[in-house]
Image (cartoon, rainbow, N blue to C red):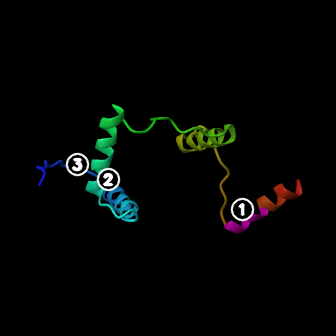
């Protein structure tokens, strides 16, 4: 039997649970997946995937910036006393009023 060594890592419990579900569909454990990752890293001489920033469309990036600006208070948004008031405003917008 091959000798083994232990590796202790800290994981967010939700991430660990989600990873366990993914790998169990392949019939492997999280430990098996880590071993596969390490073997592949050794084979390629680095991370076995490209590390890239996600790319979003211009519209999505603008929407994310607007959301950040709203959260930071740089953009003031309308406030409504009720859903009825909100719905009426939307209807007026749609009607071009």
Q: Which is more foreground, mark 3 or mark 1? A: 3
Q: Secondary structure at mark 2?
A: helix
Q: Which is more foreground, mark 2 or mark 1? A: 2
Q: Which residue is mark 3?
A: 9
The stretch in magenta equals 83-88
Tell which of 43 and 29 is nearer to you. Answer: 43
Left or right of 2 on screen, residue 45: right
Residue at the top extreme of this rendering: 45
Q: Residue at x 78, y 64 (%)?
A: 88
Relative to 95, does residue 56 appear above or below in the rendering? above
Tell which of 12 and 72 is nearer to you. Answer: 12
Q: Which secondary structure type mostly characterizes the magenta part of the structure?
A: helix
Q: Quadrant of the C terminus?
A: bottom right
Q: Which residue is mark 1?
A: 86
Q: Which residue is mark 2?
A: 33
For residue 20, the mark is none
**Is the residue marked by circle 1 packed among few (<14), some (14-19), or many (20+) residues within 10 Å?**
some
Disc 2 and disc 1 in contact, CB within 8 angstroms? no
Q: Quadrant of the N terminus?
A: bottom left
Instruction: Classify residue 84 by image quadrant.
Output: bottom right
Cα separation, mark 2 vs mark 1, equals 50 Å
Instruction: Classify residue 74 by image quadrant.
Output: top right
In x, y percent, where is residue 28?
A: 32, 61
In x, y percent, where is residue 61?
A: 62, 39
């Amino acid at each position: 039997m091959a000798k083994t060594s232990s590796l202790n890592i800290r994981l967010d419990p939700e991430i660990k649970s989600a990873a366990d579900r993914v790998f169990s569909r392949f019939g492997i454990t999280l430990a098996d997946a880590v071993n596969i990752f390490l073997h592949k890293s050794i084979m390629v001489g680095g991370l076995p995937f490209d590390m890239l920033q996600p790319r979003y469309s211009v519209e999505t990036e603008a929407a994310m910036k607007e959301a950040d600006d709203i959260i930071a208070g740089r953009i003031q948004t309308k406030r409504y006393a009720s859903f009825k008031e909100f719905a009426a405003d939307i209807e007026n917008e749609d009607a071009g009023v």
